[in-house]
Image: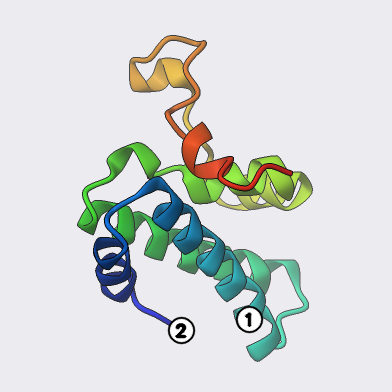
Amino acid sequence: MKRAKDYVAEFEEAGKTEAAAHQILMAMLTEVHELIDKRKAKETAAILAILNEVDDKWRSFVTKAKIPQCQYAFRSLHLRDYTRIYFEWILAFPAHRLPLPTELGLSSQCDLGLHKILNQNPR
C-alpha cells in the first residue's frame, strides 16, 4: 500500500492533471478492496474502519497535493457507486458525512467541483 506522500509524488510526476487525480482515486478504491481481502474483513465494523483509513489517506493526499476542491471525492464516489455502504459508513461515523453545499457557503446548485474528478470514466 502506498502512503499519501507517494501518491503526491505520482500526481506531480503526472503533471497534476484531473486524470491523474482520478487515477489516484481509483487506486485508493482498489486499496480498500485489497485491505478487505488482506485483513479478511467480513464484519461491517472492520470494513468501515478500512474506509476511514483510506479516506484519511485521501484527505492527506489532497492537502499535500494542494487540491482542496477534491477533498470529498472519495466520499462522493462511495455515495454515487456504493450508496448502501456510504450510508452505513455515515451512520457509524457521522463525521464522514458529506457536507451540504450550503454548509460550505456554496449555492445549493454547486457540485463541490467534483464532477471532473468523478466523471473521468463515467458509469
Question: Hey, what amino acid is under mark 1?
Answer: Glu
The vertical placement of 100 against 73, above or below, is: above
Q: Say which label, 2 or 1, has the lower sequence index.
A: 2
Which residue carries the number 2 mark?
A: 1
x%, y% of residue 42?
A: 77, 78
**Residue drawn at the location 21% of the way across and 48% of the way down:** 66
Q: Residues within 10 Å of mark 1 (few under 14, many from 20)?
A: few
Q: Secondary structure at mark 1?
A: helix
The vertical placement of 120 against 16, above or below, is: above
Instruction: Tell me: 30 left or right of 96.
Output: right
Whether residue 54 is visible to the viewer of this picture, yes or no, is: yes
Which residue carries the number 1 mark?
A: 34
Instruction: Tell me: 121 left or right of 16.
Output: right
Q: Which mark is residue 89?
A: none
x%, y% of residue 100?
A: 49, 23
**Residue drawn at the location 24% of the way across and 62% of the way down:** 12
Instruction: Tell me: 15 left or right of 113.
Output: left
Question: Hey, what amino acid is under mark 2?
Answer: Met
Mark 2 near mark 1, Cβ–Cβ under 8 Å? Answer: yes
The vertical placement of 56 against 2, above or below, is: above
Instruction: Tell me: 48 left or right of 71.
Output: right
**Spatial separation of the CA atoms under disc 2 and disc 1:** 9 Å
**Residue drawn at the location 74% of the way across and 44% of the way down:** 123
Whether residue 95 is visible to the viewer of this picture, yes or no, is: no
**Residue drawn at the location 28% of the way across and 53% of the way down:** 16
x%, y% of residue 88?
A: 71, 50
The vertical placement of 19 against 42, above or below, is: above
Q: Residues within 10 Å of mark 2 (few under 14, many from 20)?
A: few
Colour scheme employed for the rendering of this structure: rainbow
